[in-house]
Image: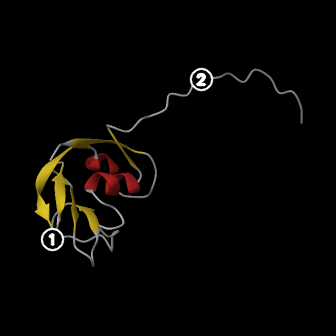
Amino acid sequence: YPTFEVTAQVGGNLGDGPARLGMYKFDKMYNGAAAYTNGKYIVFYGGEKSGWQWVTGYNQWAGNGPTLSAIADAEAFIKSKQFQLGTDEVKDYPTFEVTAQVGG
């Protein structure tokens, strides 16, 4: 199972954003899906009733997350929480200058 990097929080209201960033490595199979950790947070599938979780321990619960049939893996779940992965394409928009007001 390949490692992946969470590089930025780009929206949403999930707390402790900076601690959720970093390299995530495979921890173990849990309820039929690969679980990953960055050493502080674990993203895992808690089963049909709990769904995907992104918490600091396997014994914690952050509400009913999406099911495995709705979101297939940990990376997709992280992206659904409005975090950016190192593999995401980030568009580079050109800068521009506003020079004058022309009307109303």
* Residue closest to the far left: 28
Q: Is residue 46 left or right of residue 71?
A: left
Left of 12 or right of it: where is 36?
A: left
Task: For mark 2, give the secondary structure.
Answer: loop
- In this rendered view, identify the residue nearer to me: 80 or 96: 80
The circle drawn on residue 95 is 2
Residue type at tag 2: Thr
Q: Which mark is residue 91?
A: none
Identity of the residue drawn at 32% across and 68% down: 69
- The x and y percentages for residue 96 are 65, 23
Q: Position of residue 46 (x, y in %)?
A: 22, 70
As shown in the figure, which amino acid type bears the numbered disc 1?
Answer: Asn
Circles 2 and 1, Cβ within 8 Å, touching? The answer is: no
Q: Position of residue 30 (x, y in %)?
A: 14, 65
- In the picture as drawn, the residue positioned furthest to the right comes out as 104
Residue holding disc 1: 59
